């Protein structure tokens, strides 16, 4: 691909043509009805391009707009300046709702798609070209003429941000959503609860944030608490911002493990707290895996979470809720008389092995899944959720390598691949230098780029269960947005291409060359990114 069209992720098909489109002092965005939000987003994006001075939106119902979509010859209402036309054309055929055509002629630019999601993906390509491929001239920015026809390989192209270990402001989340859209990601997985904090306001349960949203800060000797939570208005703001960019927001509420912050407000929902009313918890100021988890023998837990999940589903309109399910030690369950009674009742006892707490967890997660189903939602869980039998509509997020995902797909579960080992965990170090930020391993840029979500061990039918992949950013050692950016980029660029582009078009050498152009885009958007070696 010419450096004129150094787009990441690489498009399915593209061609360059003679001539250039020039952004004049005034750029007009003109869209057919139904694309008002997409037009506003593109206007906001282009206004951030150095060299583009004014971006104006023409009402879809204006005389100017009507004349421009008519056959040639209707020029009397044509505005002075450069023009970008956005149009929905249902007759266009793509395999996904996100397919688009970006047609750049010297006289105007057209973004065409069958659905509005495709318009945003085409707008992202145009934004990239204007940021990093456009030539800066005294009269503005120019882009080489050409045509791109493009659509994604996978329907799930996700980014997870851990806001439980450390709190990130809504303004940073909005910046991250724009960067996700720039790279054509379409899912924001919002990790909201863990041992260290409960970040989501549940109006009927104010104690959750009262006791769970703030914790001690060990960096200070004096008593000092840090943290925060997201109000209902914060959640709506994030969802609205994401929806305008056709990004789905998926909340995560961790159960039964990683739940100390929950137990800070309700110690009676732990095994120890149910037996001893003097037991007390505080949100953890340490990181790791803790033995105290939610009691599976307490029916009050399910009554409580019925209320919580009902409110979560009202706040988040998407079809999925992630319920965690990972790293839940069974020590307390084996000690707990209520949990042992539950296992006896359910027959989770073996003559050879005794109690079978893994089956109890599958039963527990099944109960939670049924609650979500009642509210029209589908449960996602980390890959431990299928250690026992669970609803077949559960989506498995394979993090302990790709093997759990392969196993799940063979059993008929839908799978999102996000293995921690040298692929999708972007809190890992960029390289093995002792002073490089990050922990728990190394994941180089080439590691992320060479990751393949669909294993050769799967048949074609089984491969259809691989919905896509996801980049995960855990924040134990990430305190600020700039640190998060440094850990994400440019590895997120690499994964975006893995999730979007055809497998046969990917080349790390070619990607590395395009990345040199792409770095100018990241610079223009004030992104802090890693600039060291890539292997």
Image: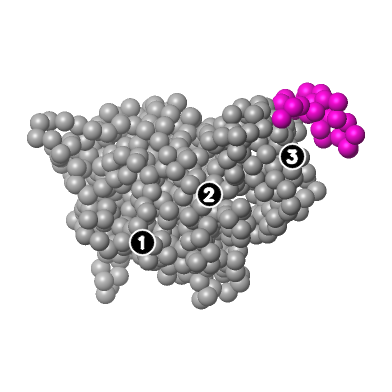
Q: In the rendered image, which residue does mark 1 sit on?
A: 533
Instruction: Give the label on residue 183, or none.
Output: 2
Q: In the rendered image, which residue does mark 3 sit on?
A: 108
Residue farthest to the left, as pictured: 221
Real-space CA distance between mark 3 and mark 1, rounded to the nearest whole angstrom:
40 Å
Where residue 497 appears, as percent x and y from the top left, is: 53, 58
Up the image or down, 139 lies above or below 111; here it is above
Q: Is residue 136 left or right of residue 99?
A: left
Q: Quadrant of the C terminus?
A: bottom left
Q: Are marks 3 and 2 in contact (CB under 8 Å)?
A: no
**Is residue 78 on the magenta stretch?**
yes
Where residue 169 appears, as percent x and y from the top left, is: 37, 33
**Rendering quarter of residue 191:** top left
Main SS of residues in magenta: loop
Classify 10 Å Cα crowding around label 3: few (below 14), some (14-19), many (20 and above): some
Residue 153 seen in this snapshot: no
Which secondary structure, mark 2? Answer: loop
**Rendering quarter of residue 312:** top left
Where residue 132 appears, as percent x and y from the top left, is: 54, 46
Classify 10 Å Cα crowding around label 2: few (below 14), some (14-19), many (20 and above): many
What span is in magenta?
58-81
Q: Is residue 87 left or right of residue 53?
A: right
Where residue 511 appears, as percent x and y from the top left, is: 51, 61
**Is residue 241 on the magenta stretch?**
no
Classify 10 Å Cα crowding around label 1: few (below 14), some (14-19), many (20 and above): few
Q: Is residue 109 left or right of residue 410?
A: right
Which secondary structure, mark 3? Answer: loop
């Amino acid at each position: 691909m010419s450096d004129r069209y150094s787009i990441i992720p690489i498009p399915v098909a593209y061609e360059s043509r003679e001539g250039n489109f020039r952004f004049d002092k005034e750029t007009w965005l003109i869209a057919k009805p139904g694309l008002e939000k997409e037009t506003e987003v593109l206007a906001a994006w282009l206004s951030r391009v150095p060299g583009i001075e004014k971006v104006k939106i023409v009402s879809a119902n204006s005389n100017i707009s009507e004349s421009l979509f008519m056959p040639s010859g209707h020029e009397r209402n044509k505005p002075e300046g450069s023009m970008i036309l956005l149009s929905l054309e249902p007759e266009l055929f793509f395999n996904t709702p996100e397919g688009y055509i970006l047609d750049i002629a010297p006289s105007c630019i057209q973004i065409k798609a069958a659905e509005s999601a495709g318009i945003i993906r085409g707008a992202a390509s145009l934004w990239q070209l204007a940021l990093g491929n456009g030539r800066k001239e005294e009269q503005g920015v120019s882009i080489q003429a050409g045509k791109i026809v493009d659509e994604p390989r996978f329907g799930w192209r996700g980014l997870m941000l851990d806001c439980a270990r450390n709190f990130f402001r809504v303004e940073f989340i909005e910046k991250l959503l724009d960067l996700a859209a720039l790279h054509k990601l379409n899912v924001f997985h919002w990790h909201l609860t863990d041992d260290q904090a409960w970040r989501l306001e549940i109006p009927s349960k104010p104690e959750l944030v009262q006791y769970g949203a703030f914790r001690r800060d060990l960096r200070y000797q004096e008593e000092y608490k840090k943290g925060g939570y997201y109000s209902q208005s914060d959640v709506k703001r994030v969802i609205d911002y994401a929806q305008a960019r056709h990004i789905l927001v998926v909340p995560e509420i961790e159960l039964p493990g990683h739940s100390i912050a929950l137990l800070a407000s309700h110690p009676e929902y732990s095994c120890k707290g149910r037996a001893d009313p003097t037991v007390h918890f505080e949100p953890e100021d340490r990181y790791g895996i803790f033995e105290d988890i939610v009691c599976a023998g307490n029916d009050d837990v399910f009554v409580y979470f019925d209320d919580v999940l009902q409110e979560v589903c009202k706040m988040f309109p998407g079809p999925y809720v992630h319920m965690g399910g990972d790293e839940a030690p069974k020590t307390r369950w084996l000690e707990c008389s209520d949990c042992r009674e539950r296992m006896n009742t359910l027959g989770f006892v073996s003559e050879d092995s005794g109690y079978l707490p893994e089956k109890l967890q599958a039963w527990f997660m099944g109960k939670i899944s049924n609650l979500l189903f009642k509210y029209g939602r589908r449960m996602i869980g980390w890959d431990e959720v299928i250690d026992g039998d669970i609803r077949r509509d559960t989506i498995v997020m394979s993090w302990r390598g790709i093997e759990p995902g392969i196993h799940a797909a063979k059993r008929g579960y839908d799978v999102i691949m996000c293995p921690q080992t040298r692929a999708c965990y972007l809190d890992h170090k960029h390289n093995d230098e002792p002073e490089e930020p990050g922990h728990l391993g190394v994941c180089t840029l080439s590691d992320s780029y060479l990751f393949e979500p669909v294993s050769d061990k799967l048949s074609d039918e089984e491969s259809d269960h691989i919905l896509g992949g996801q980049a995960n950013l855990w924040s134990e050692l990430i305190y600020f947005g700039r640190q998060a950016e440094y850990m994400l980029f440019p590895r997120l660029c690499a994964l975006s291409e893995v999730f979007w582009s055809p497998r046969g078009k990917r080349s790390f050498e070619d990607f590395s060359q395009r990345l040199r152009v792409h770095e100018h885009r990241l610079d223009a958007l004030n992104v802090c990114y890693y600039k060291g070696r890539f292997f």
